[in-house]
Image (cartoon, rainbow, N blue to C red):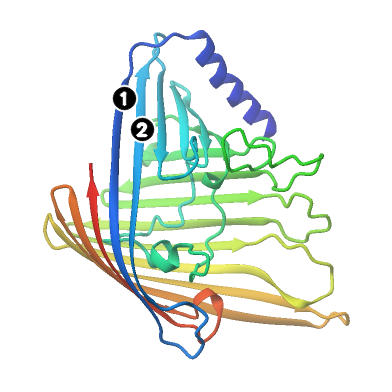
Amino acid sequence: MNKLTKILFSAITSVMLVTSAFAGEFAVTGGVKTTYTILSNSGTVGTHGVGKGVGLSNEFSLTASGELDNGMTWSYAQDIDGATVQDDANLAIGTDYGTFKVCISECGLSTKYSFDNSAYGVGSDNGYGGGASSGTTMQYGSNISSYNNVQYHAPADILPFSLTFKAASTVGGAGGTANDSSHSVVGTKTVGDMTQYAVTMAPIDGLSLAASYYIMDAAGNIGARQENEGGSYSANYSMGPVSLGYGETLHAPSQRMSTASTTAKTNYYDNNAFSLGFAVNDALSVSYTEENSEKKTKATSVANAVTRTAVEMEIETIDLAYTVGGMTLSVSNSETKNASYIEGDDVTETIVAMSMAF
């Protein structure tokens, strides 16, 4: 895979150096969202904060595109959301043989949420469940968009059933910012190489299928018995105003441990979810989404006695969204059982949001 990434990188840079371009197009788009959130604990264990709060977030996107004088196409996209410059950016070169991309913390290939038909968003990807430092994060595994990477996308419309294929790899280790060098510290990589693949297809009208797989080696993880790897697959079917999706994900985190360990280590997370969406009319939509994740652990004593445990986390989310022109008003209510895989830690969250697109 290292040889492939070198070839892709060389091809992109060669095209940029020797081929002149016609005048391209440039656009600026963006959006702003304000939220009012109510959070409470409803279980026997209260490990998460409670209260109410107002939030405001924004994101601007800069896009440019054009055509080279040899018929190839190019595009550049840059997201600005208060992060560092060149975070969330990608450059793509389109050819008859496919598209080649260089991505900075962007271009994720994971299909973990391809089942989603929610009006506001799945519970594990929004609000308190969406990755807050003390949130109810559900484990879906890694995505290459967290790192600098190069990608190849097979040409569209050459395979049956609208089949697409994409492959991505970090180069020399997974880093997360522009011109990153954290993958090499005195000859020791702190983050391993990562590769990811994704396929999608639409075999019949209304039905879409998606699958993805990734693996990341455990840099510096001598004697590790388990690499960080995982995959997802999903099916989504739409008929008129109704959309129904189902997906499954398996995520095995990297393990750094000796043969005997009395501390429980996570073997894997086994997830499944379904999402039902209904468009009442052109402006109003409602949805129900349920996500389940089972964390399976194992502890091995010095006498090689194995103890296995499992904790199931569940998030149920009901959404409503109403759109008027460039403004969308949304209400989302999620109920989480065993938040962060802690039995008895139940969390309820209600989000009222107003979004403006421009």
Q: Provide the residue designation for mark 1.
A: 26
Res 187 quadrant in image: top right
Foreground of the two, 346 or 282: 346
- In the rendered image, the quadrant that contains the N terminus is top right
- Circle 2: element type: strand
Total residue callouts: 2
* Residue 352 spot, x, y in % from top left: 26, 67
Foreground of the two, 154 or 67: 67
Q: Residues within 10 Å of mark 1 (few under 14, many from 20)?
A: few
Q: Can you say whether 222 is above or below 289 in the image?
A: above
At x 39%, y 32%, the residue is 156
At x 56%, y 39%, the residue is 168
Q: Residues within 10 Å of mark 2 (few under 14, many from 20)?
A: some
C-alpha span from label 1 to label 2: 7 Å
Check disc 1 and give the amino acid type. Phe
Q: Are marks 1 and 2 in contact (CB under 8 Å)?
A: yes
Q: Earlier in the sequence, mark 1 or mark 2?
A: 1
Extreme residue toward the bottom, this view: 44
Q: Can you say whether 288 is above or below 236 in the image?
A: below
* Residue 166 spot, x, y in % from top left: 50, 38
Check disc 2 and give the amino acid type. Leu
Residue 62: mark in rendering: 2
* Residue 135 spot, x, y in % from top left: 49, 69
Q: Can you say whether 246 is above or below 309 in the image?
A: above
Q: Can you say whether 46 is above or below 33 in the image?
A: below
- Circle 1: element type: strand
* Residue 117 spot, x, y in % from top left: 30, 60
Residue 339: mark in rendering: none
